[in-house]
Structures are given as C-alpha cells and as structure tokens.
Image (cartoon, rainbow, N blue to C red):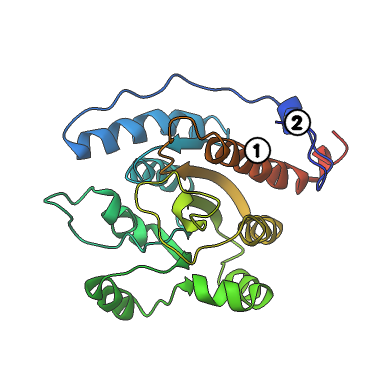
Amino acid sequence: MELYDEETGVEIHRQGVFTIQPIDPILPPEAMVQKIKDTVSPIVNAGQMPVVIGGDHSVSIGAIEAVNAAAGRLNIVHFDAHTDLRDSYLGSRYSHACAMRRVCGLGNMLQIGIRSVSRDEIEFLNRLNVEPIWAREVIEDRNSAILEAVSRLEPSLPTYVTIDLDCLDPSIMPAVGTPEPGGLSWTDLTQFLSAITRTANIVAFDVVELAPIPGYHAADFTAARLIYKFLNYIFASREPLRNT
C-alpha cells in the first residue's frame, strides 16, 4: 500500500500510528464489551484517537461507550447493510445484530447504506422518528444523499464513525459474514467519509466485520486502504497537518 495519499497530499504515518496488542476474546459477550471499553477508555482519556479494528460488530459497543463516557453525547455515524437494532438475537442482547440498539441512546444516530432490516427494527426506528439513508438512495443520487447526511449531523457534537464492511457491495467486499447485494461503491463510501470529516469533529472510528477469504487478498487490502484513507481525511482537515 502506498503511504502517500494522492487526494489529500497527506502521509498520515508520519504523525505516528501506535498499534496495541489484540484483545483476547472472553465470554459472556457483555464481559467482552466491558473489556473493550476498559481498553479504549485510557486512549480517549489521553487525548488520542482510537481506531478499533474488529471482526464482530459487537466490538463497537464498548468502544462507543468509552468515547461517550469521556466526550459526552455523540454523533454516531453508522455505515452498514443492516440496522443492527434488534433488542436480542440468538439469545444475546450483545450480538452483532444488536450493536446499534445498545448505543443508540448515546447520541444522534445516522445510518447509511442500509438495505436489510427486520419489521421489529423498522417499528423501533419509527418510534425514534429516525429514517436511515438507504443504499438505494445513495445509488440513485449520491450527492443528494451526502447532503442529507451532513445536514443531519449536529456540528457541536464529537463524532464516532462505525463502518461495517458489508455496507460495501459484495462485488468489491465479499469477505464479510453477512453480504447483501446492492451496496455502496468505494467512491460512495469515501465521498461520504470526506464530507463528514469536513463537517464534524471525528474523535474515533472503527472498521469491523472483515472475514478474510483464504487466498483472496483484495478484500483485506481494501479494508486496510479504507482505514488509511479515513485517517488521511481526518488529519488533512486539521490545519497544522496539511503540509505534512
């Protein structure tokens, strides 16, 4: 992967990227959520920006809780094929299918790229009076969808972005646990991230649900490039780093 970003002119690795050791999984799921929260909290409290890389989307719960505890109410921007708003799934309230249900009360939630949802989740969204930005809307008119997304952010709030890789179309991101047809393109996703970064103060993000396919490296590279691209957007928006 080339370290120079042609779009922003930034080489974010020059700012320093520190990678901690992977967090070993534990049971029950709520204990894992707490372990992630305990790991992320010192990073946030030290004034650093955590980037959480995980498999199951439930890892986002503890990370968002940690950022909320330190920073208060958040914009929570959620890219996904699914709303992840079930109250319980397969006997657990901390399933990947429940991730956003557990944190939606921590701020202003904006969901983008959705194209698979249960009736119960639609009824919950109706009670919240919240409408996702559906994948079909992005595909029909990306610019209008981006403007809609930006208008729904609260500029005064710190922003957490959670990216489930199945928001992308499986033609470019097949290596996920629950692929759905009709997803976003690379350009769709990166233009959303660029616009959100110019509007909001990104304090943390995660990229989750990569399920590597043996011998197929394109998806792994795409996930890595996405993380690096988003970091470049974030730090290019901070004036002192423009000429790094």
Q: Earlier in the sequence, mark 2 or mark 1?
A: 2
* Residue 152 shows up from this direction: yes
| Residue drawn 39% across the image and 28% down it | 39
Would residue 232 appear left or right of 47 to someone viewing this image?
right
Above or below: residue 220 compared with residue 119: above
Q: Position of residue 156 (x, y in %)?
A: 59, 61
**Classed neighbour count for the residue bearing mark 2: other residues with Cα under 10 Å, few (<14), some (14–19), many (≥20):** some
**In the displayed structure, would residue 83 be above or below residue 37?**
below
Residue 108, image quadrant: bottom left
Disc number placed over residue 3 in the picture, else none: 2
Residue 229 placement (x, y as % from top left)? 68, 43
- In which quadrant of the rendered image does the C terminus lie? top right
Real-space CA distance between mark 2 and mark 1, rounded to the nearest whole angstrom: 8 Å
The image quarter in which residue 124 lies: bottom left
Residue 99 lies, in percent from the top left, at 31, 52
Is residue 76 visible in the rendered image? The answer is: no
The residue sitting at 61% across, 58% down in the picture is: 189
Q: Amino acid at mark 2?
A: Leu
- Residue marked by disc 1: 228
Q: Quadrant of the N terminus?
A: top right
Residue type indicated by callout 1: Tyr
